[in-house]
Image (tube, rainbow, N blue to C red):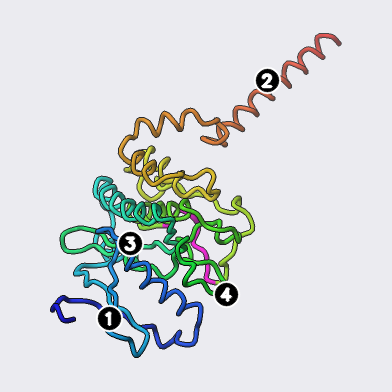
């Protein structure tokens, strides 16, 4: 560059040079990076001269991916995870305010620079209302995103929403704290889902019994399979990660069958048993 600024030159992978779906995402990524301004979003730069081949330049970010950070910090404290999640949420809000959904949020697509600031670095899968000028007639052969981070609604065949990004962020928070995933890991050939009921949440307390139960309650809501039962706003997730008392108050107001189905059915069984004993006793007395 004429300014002497360090940048990254990005070109399409030769392995996908004949894949229109991949190339469409490549062009999309450059477009988004030039139009959205936020310190947590990677910048892409307009070319100063006519291009002779497909490429674009991005800002150079000195640091490591969140995936690498997680490998070096297998059991971080809640405060540090909260700090990183809050930064990611701030960057996502900048996308959502412009009616843009990221659709492929995962630790590999997030950088942490040498000063501890995060950057979301990949926009190849975004869904944006303002992309009409780049619209194509391509038919997606599989959902956008990455298996195990992709929101269940994509796997069912429904369109994504801002809540889809919240699901991915919830999975990241869960994995940062435990090194595990909140649902049984899916295989590559199982990139589909028939019903939300097929997903069974695994309490993070199984992996981190030292964590408070309210953290588990927050994560469970963030990664709820049904988007209608998920957090509706990023600010709600960030808020609940800071105020455990309110999380538990809200949890206590839920029906017992949702909070603790085992206890609910044990109680129902006990009541039915008492009624049965009463009926038998009355029958014997009448006899």
- Name the residue at 34% across, 43% down: 238
Residue 182 is a magenta residue: yes
- Name the residue at 44% across, 31% down: 250
- Magenta range: 181-188
| Residue 101, quarter of picture | bottom left
Q: CA distance from mark 3 to mark 4?
A: 25 Å
Q: Read off the residue under disc 3.
A: 36
Q: Which mark is residue 85?
A: none
Q: Mark 4 packing: few (<14 Cα in 10 Å), some, or many (20+)? A: few
Q: Nearer the viewer, residue 142 or 149?
A: 142
Q: Mark 1 packing: few (<14 Cα in 10 Å), some, or many (20+)? A: few
The image position of residue 165, as x and y in percent, is: 43, 55
The image position of residue 133, as x and y in percent, is: 47, 70
Q: Read off the residue under disc 1.
A: 9
Q: Mark 2 packing: few (<14 Cα in 10 Å), some, or many (20+)? A: few
Q: Nearer the viewer, residue 100 or 69?
A: 100
Q: Is residue 119 left or right of residue 184?
A: left
Q: Read off the residue under disc 4.
A: 137
Q: Read off the residue under disc 2.
A: 274
Q: Mark 3 packing: few (<14 Cα in 10 Å), some, or many (20+)? A: some
């Amino acid at each position: 560059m004429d300014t002497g600024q360090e940048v990254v030159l990005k070109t399409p992978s030769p392995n996908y040079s004949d894949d229109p779906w991949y190339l469409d995402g490549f062009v999309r990524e450059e477009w988004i990076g030039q139009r959205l301004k936020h310190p947590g979003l990677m910048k892409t730069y307009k070319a100063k001269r006519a291009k002779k081949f497909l490429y674009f330049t991005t800002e150079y970010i000195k640091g490591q991916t969140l995936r690498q950070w997680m490998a070096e910090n297998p059991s971080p404290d809640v405060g540090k995870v909260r700090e990183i999640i809050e930064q990611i949420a701030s960057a996502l809000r900048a996308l959502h305010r412009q009616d843009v959904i990221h659709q492929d949020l995962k630790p590999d697509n997030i950088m942490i620079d040498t000063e501890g600031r995060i950057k979301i670095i990949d926009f190849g899968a975004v869904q944006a209302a303002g992309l009409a000028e780049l619209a194509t007639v391509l038919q997606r052969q599989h959902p956008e995103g990455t298996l195990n981070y992709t929101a269940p609604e994509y796997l069912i065949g429904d369109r994504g929403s801002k809540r889809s990004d919240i699901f991915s962020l919830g999975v990241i928070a869960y994995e940062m704290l435990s090194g595990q995933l909140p649902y049984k890991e899916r295989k590559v050939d199982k990139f589909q889902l028939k019903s939300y009921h097929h997903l069974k949440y695994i309490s993070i307390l199984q992996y981190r019994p030292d964590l408070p139960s309210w953290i588990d309650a927050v994560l469970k809501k963030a990664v709820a399979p049904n988007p209608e039962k998920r957090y509706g706003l990023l600010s709600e997730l960030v808020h609940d990660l800071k105020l455990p008392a309110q999380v538990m108050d809200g949890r206590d107001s839920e029906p017992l069958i949702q909070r603790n189905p085992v206890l609910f059915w044990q109680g129902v069984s006990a009541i039915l048993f008492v009624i049965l004993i009463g009926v038998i006793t009355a029958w014997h007395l009448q006899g």
